[in-house]
Amino acid sequence: MQLITTTGSDSAANAVIRLNPLDDVLIARQPLPKGLHLQAEHIEVLQAIPAGHKVAVRAIAPGQPLRRYGQIIGFASQPIAAGEHVHVHNLAMGDFARDYAFGVDARGTPATTDDTFMGIVRADGRVATRNYIGILTSVNCSATVARAIADHFRRDIHPEALAPYPNVDGVVALTHGVGCAVDPGGEALAMLQRTLGGYAVHANFASVLMIGLGCETNQIPDLLAAQGLNSSHTLRTFTIQGTGGTTRTIASGIAQVKSLLAEADQVRREPVSVRHLTVGLQCGGSDGYSGITANPALGNAVDRLVAAGGTAILSETPEIYGAEHLLTRRAVSREVGEKLIARIHWWEAYCERMGAELNNNPSAGNKAGGLTTILEKSLGAVAKAGSSDLMDVYEYAEPVRAHGLVFMDTPGYDPISATGQVAGGANLIAFTTGRGSAYGCAPSPSIKLATNARLWETQEDDMDVNCGGIADASTTIEERGEHIYRLMLRIASGERSKSEQHGYGQNEFVPWQIGAIT
């Protein structure tokens, strides 16, 4: 994205933003009244336009493309006059060729800094940002007992339970709604097992209990075998049927957690390389400012993270649709670029099979915030990825092995997407929002970045960073990027994010379920 410029030197000078000289639209910094004259653009606003929405800078004939960020965001569905509001009533999707140009912009992004954070080094060398005991379930049928065990150790209900163990961040039960009545050899069960397997070995868990009912399709021994895992002192498995019912299972679980607490409390933080930090990138409740403020600021932080040897996971495949060519150009090889396009084709077939439209992703909140098409939303979303090379592409919940910027195929729905990222190894989540999100994550902390000052003022209780000043030029993308990067290191070192302070995380574990339930 080019540097933001404002229009004019008159009283409306700071009312709009131009992002690229090629753009056919300006972005309203504030509500624009009818009749406002934008002197530098030689246009008059023809109707009231909400903040974050688009105003045309020239006349556009039906069928002609419109550009924002210098890229096509859609096609005029009716004549558009200069000064007119551009939105769903006159802008629509359309097909056009994209030049994937695999790797032409890859430049090599070796680590150039030696930054550190205060991490928790496990006995096997894995590095954690948090220190939880986790309770996982193989099936929804064991969710109630898992929650009952975790509730026994809740600091807001039983503060005495964990008082002797100050280095234990908590005991969390991550439950879900599936695990049975699925094809035992199908993709849906394999994806669930991959997700649970990733959480079972996540560095942020000192130890894990995995609880089943006993008769479910997702048998725990099969799950462990599929993921190359074995039961151990720190990965304990049992079932309600095998233990003898609900009461005995809860009692057994509580006793086992108690037996693990003293050992889990022995951890100490120490300086470790940023190479051990993996950040999942998310945006939810996006608005017209997302691609101008918080997303490029996060992208700047990602470039700093990569320069220090860290890893960032871009995801939400339906929300890069139409902007994937900006990523393939940065792929380190044609093979990596083609892996990304293969996932796009999978989604096209998936949506056709399900009777859905991949190009109809923007939500009601996105549209109210000024985003019109998936192309526009995707171009802003890709800004989270900064400018670093794309090192690899992963399927949902696959273990992330590469360092640097990578892509993981996930839906756009934030809890499902972040669940896959954490299963893949993310030990921190960075989440931009323009409409306001109350998302949190466990066992990996989540920081939330507000795209506009109004959101920061009204929902500061949930926001960790205000990026709204970028829109009014009171701060810069570079300054906010540095701030976000340093906050990442502090949160990874143990500082608690807003969502952690509110106790978010257990309810946001949502594995992706793509198969038929029979």
Image (cartoon, rainbow, N blue to C red):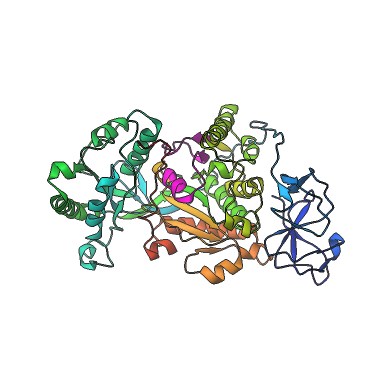
Q: Is residue 420 magenta?
A: yes
Q: Which percent across, then down, holds residue 444? A: 39, 52
Residue at left offset 51%, top offset 68%: 459
Task: Give above or below for 142 relative to 26.
Answer: above
Q: How many marks?
A: 0
Asked whether the viewer can see residue 497, the reply is: no
Q: Is residue 168 magenta?
A: no
- State which quarter of the image contains the C terminus: top left
**Is 31 on the left-hand or right-hand side of 463?**
right
Q: Which percent across, then down, holds residue 16? A: 75, 63
Foreground residue among 119 and 246: 246
Foreground residue among 413 and 408: 413
Corner quadrant of residue 517: top left
Task: Give above or below for 488 relative to 126.
Answer: below
Residue at left offset 77%, top offset 50%: 23
Task: Give above or below for 118 relative to 197.
Answer: below
The segment highlighted magenta reads 392-421
Q: Residue furthest right?
A: 42
Foreground residue among 376 and 259: 376
Residue at left offset 25%, top offset 67%: 157
Task: Give above or below for 281 relative to 189.
Answer: below
**Is 223 on the left-hand or right-hand side of 101?**
left
Q: Which percent across, then down, holds residue 487? A: 49, 59
Corner quadrant of residue 356: top right
Q: Which percent across, then down, holds residue 286? A: 58, 56
Asked whether the viewer can see residue 508, the reply is: yes
**Is 167 on the left-hand or right-hand side of 9?**
left
**Is 434 on the left-hand or right-hand side of 258?**
right
